[in-house]
Image: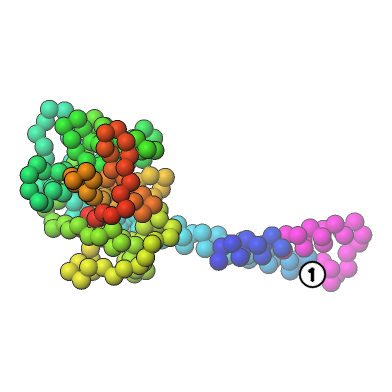
Amino acid sequence: MGKIIIIMGLCLIMVTANAQEKTSAPLSPSAIQQFIHLQQQQIALTKQLLTTQQQQLNTASQLLQSSQYRESKDYSWQDVKKDSKLPENLINANLAGGKPLYICHARFKNLGVHPGQYTTKGCRITYAGKSYEEKQFALLASKAKTTWQPSDSIYQMDQQRQYYQAYRPKPIGIFPLNSSLPKSSLPIVGGHEKGHSLYICRGLYKNQIHLGKVVTGNCNIGYQGKEIYLRGFEVLFS
């Protein structure tokens, strides 16, 4: 809609310019009225374009507020200081038993906040084909119930709930959500990059479970200094 309005506005500007080129000769009353009418149409189209853009900004703001509300209500990110005890109620992604697998996120330079996997060295995150162990990070804690769902769950295009992942323009397929998943459930936002939300994922690699971030249909995890892209994975829902 916005593109159509812009094209129409450009056409009016061209017509107006042509009319102005002819103003070297005295204009008749009818020509003046036509010129005024064209100017009014141009102003109306500009107002309509601004209204459309404002509506888009309002929608984005509502989604952001909704995400922030859910974060403060259902779960929280707990900062971890060096040599301090781990916070309580951490979400363990390794449900099969054995060593706990905790979810972290960390800021990487000025390139956003990235979810990853807690290790003894810090928070393992990935960026541009490499993995990094960040020393300043936070761990995900929640007293509420969380669940892991197949990756295609986050690409269910539900206009009322509006949590479709915009960072993946064309999903491979559209699948119904798991019937056991409450309608109020949403994927937990683990961070952000270039204005896009980054969801938390886990996948199997080298016979081990790894945590990472959802980017363009993959679960990007860190392994031996590299960024590995997994096609089969699960996403954390609240």
Badge 1 crowding class, 10 Å Cα cut-off, few under 14, some 14 to 19, many 20 or more, is few
| Residue 11 spot, x, y in % from top left | 71, 63
Q: Nearer the viewer, residue 120 or 195?
A: 120
Query: Quarter-wise, where is residue 225 in the image?
Result: top left
What residue do we see at 76% from left, 60% from top? Answer: 14
Q: Which residue is mark 1?
A: 33
Where's the N terminus, which quadrant? bottom right
Q: Residue furthest top?
A: 83
- Specify whether residue 206 is in view: yes
Q: Nearer the viewer, residue 32 or 189?
A: 189
Where's the C terminus, which quadrant? bottom left
Q: Is residue 203 above or below residue 28?
A: above
- Specify whether residue 189 is in view: no
Q: Residue furthest front?
A: 206
In this rendering, the count of numbered labels is: 1
What residue do we see at 7% from left, 48% from top? Answer: 97
In this picture, which residue range is highlighted in magenta?
12-34
Q: Is residue 228 above or below residue 162?
A: above
| Residue 2 spot, x, y in % from top left | 56, 63
User: Does 202 lie within the magenta span?
Assistant: no
